[in-house]
Image: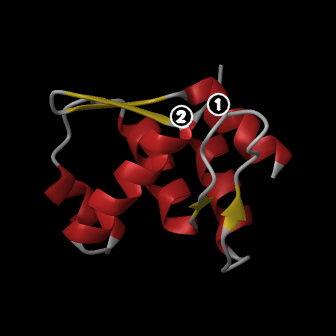
């Protein structure tokens, strides 16, 4: 089982890059955008919290980013297939996230 510290270690490893991460288009069909470092931080935070109905405002405060950036990050993550959004619930696609982190 993946522990929270594993997510934190992966985030620390990626956060030093300071650049965009190209998402593998071949894997997730029509998604042609970039996943940003703050998107990875958001996904890791949601995975660690394991609370599907955490308010976006709380995410913004805990990650020290603006609520509008949280909204944009959630949209990018959902478009890429790394996050499931439905009626206020935010669920991380953990297997896709781990594959993304392992291959990028």
Q: Quadrant of the N terminus?
A: top right
Q: Which mark is in front, 2 or 1?
A: 2
57 to the left or right of 82: left
Q: Are marks 2 and 1 in contact (CB under 8 Å)?
A: yes
Residue 97 horizontal side relative to residue 27, left or right: left
Distance of mark 2 from mark 1, alpha carbons? 7 Å
Residue 98: percent from left, percent from top: 69, 35
Residue ID at (75%, 33%): 27
Display colour scheme = secondary structure
Q: Residues within 10 Å of mark 2 (few under 14, many from 20)?
A: some
- As drawn, 46 above or below 104: above
Q: Of all residues shown, which one is farthest toward the bottom?
A: 18
Q: What residue appears at the point 66 percent right and 71 percent down from the top-left corner?
A: 20
Between 88 and 52, the one lying in front of the other is: 88
The residue identified by callout 1 is 96
In the rendered image, residue 65, in percent from the top left (x then y), is placed at 31, 74
Q: Position of residue 54 (x, y in %)?
A: 20, 40
| Dot 1 crowding, Cα within 10 Å, few <14, some 14–19, many 20+ | some
Task: Find residue 97 and report its image quarter.
Answer: top right
Mark 1 falls on what kind of element?
helix
Q: Which residue ends up furthest to the right in the rendered image?
A: 103
Choose top left, top right, bottom left or bottom right for residue 19. Answer: bottom right
Residue drawn 34% across and 61% down? 72
Q: Say which label, 2 or 1, has the lower sequence index.
A: 2
Mark 2 — residue?
81
Q: Is residue 38 left or right of residue 69?
A: right
Q: Is residue 33 above or below residue 85?
A: below
Give the numbered dot on residue 46. Answer: none
- Residue placed most toward the observer, 88 or 17: 88
């Amino acid at each position: 089982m993946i522990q929270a510290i594993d997510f934190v270690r992966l985030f620390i490893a990626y956060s030093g890059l300071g650049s965009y991460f190209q998402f593998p288009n071949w894997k997730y069909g029509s998604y042609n955008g970039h996943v940003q470092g703050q998107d990875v931080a958001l996904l890791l935070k949601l995975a660690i919290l394991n609370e599907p109905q955490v308010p976006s405002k709380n995410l913004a405060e805990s990650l020290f980013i603006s609520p509008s950036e949280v909204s944009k990050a959630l949209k990018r993550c959902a478009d890429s297939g790394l996050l499931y959004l439905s009626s206020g619930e935010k669920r991380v696609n953990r297997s896709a996230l781990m594959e993304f982190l392992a291959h990028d």
